[in-house]
Image (spheres, rainbow, N blue to C red):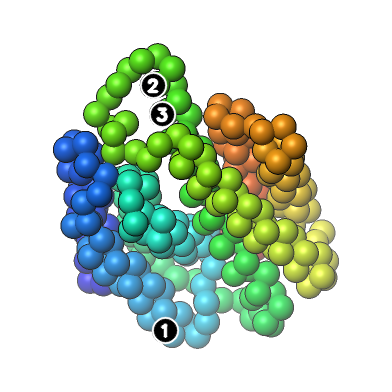
Amino acid sequence: MTIVLIAAVLYLAASMLLVVNVRREDGHGRAWLLPALVAMVLHGAAHVLAWRAIGGADLHFFAALSLVGLGMAMLTTLVGAGGRMAALGVVVFPLAAAALVACELYGHVPPEPLDWRLQLHAWLALLAYATLAVAALLALMLWLQERALRRREFHGWLRALPPLVALETLLFRTIAAGFILLSATLLTGALFVADMFAQHLVHKTVLSVLSWLVFGCLLVGRWRYGWRGRVAARWTLAAMALLVLAFFGSKFVLELVLGYGV
């Protein structure tokens, strides 16, 4: 628990330092980077120690949420270390801290035995969700920034964000990476999951495929018709909502409400 608390405090410290950057209208401060890096190392260590104690990787609802939070924090640090995109951490780091604490408070569940193929499918899914969740936050930032500029509301926080073109470019690169990971997730699921009906996975598969189709249409629309701005943000948020329902919505109902393992 000590590691978890220290990691949570460091995540919040990194977020507060980013808030200070925003208040100063400065997107280039780096004081947040060290506490964020240490927090992520401790976050990962907390999971590894728990897995050693229970004999394998725990992927129940809160553990999966925590791992997605860790992935989001890592992606945020990766894209934010070189410029003003770090402002994303104001939201991501507290979410990662809350997910880690929730996982620790809920406790760890002994893992179900999975062969390497199903483990590959599970880890690809977590990477896809983390990447596309960052894309959803970028889409929200893009929508807020565009709306503020359209209304000529020149808030100080706008200067802490990257230009619209740079934000848009990063958004679609992130969506493309997430789309590839989601495609790999669906492919490995189709190849390696033996009986979707017995494992209560039909609803998850249908929603995931719908999300994949929406993300795919968005990428085609960007390439063919130059979709951008509010259109891109709406499609991204709609696709992410389907993906959240597919994974965490189904895990919540099956694991926490009905008591099934997923």
Can I make out residue 142 in this image? yes
170 relative to 261 in the view: left or right: left
Instruction: Please tell me whether mark 1 sits on a helix, a strand or a loop.
Output: helix
- Residue picked out by circle 3: 145
Marks 3/1: CA–CA distance? 46 Å
Q: Which circle marks residue 148 in the picture?
A: 2
The answer to whether residue 252 of the structure is visible from this angle is: no
Please report contact status of discs 1 and 2: CB closer than 8 Å, yes or no: no
Image coords of residue 49 (percent x, y): 38, 81
Judged left or right of residue 78, residue 117 is: right
Is 169 left or right of 184, judged from the image as shown? left
Answer above or below: position of 7 versus 95: below
Q: Which residue is mark 1?
A: 53
Taking the spot 51% from the left edge, 39% from the top edge, the residue there is 168
| Quarter containing the N terminus | bottom left
Question: Which kind of residue does numbered mark 2 sit on?
Answer: Ala
Q: In the rendering, at what x and y percent does residue 63 appear?
A: 47, 64
The amino acid at mark 1 is Ala
Nearer the observer, 128 or 222 = 222
The residue positioned 45% from the left and 25% from the top of the image is: 146
Q: Nearer the viewer, residue 42 or 137?
A: 137
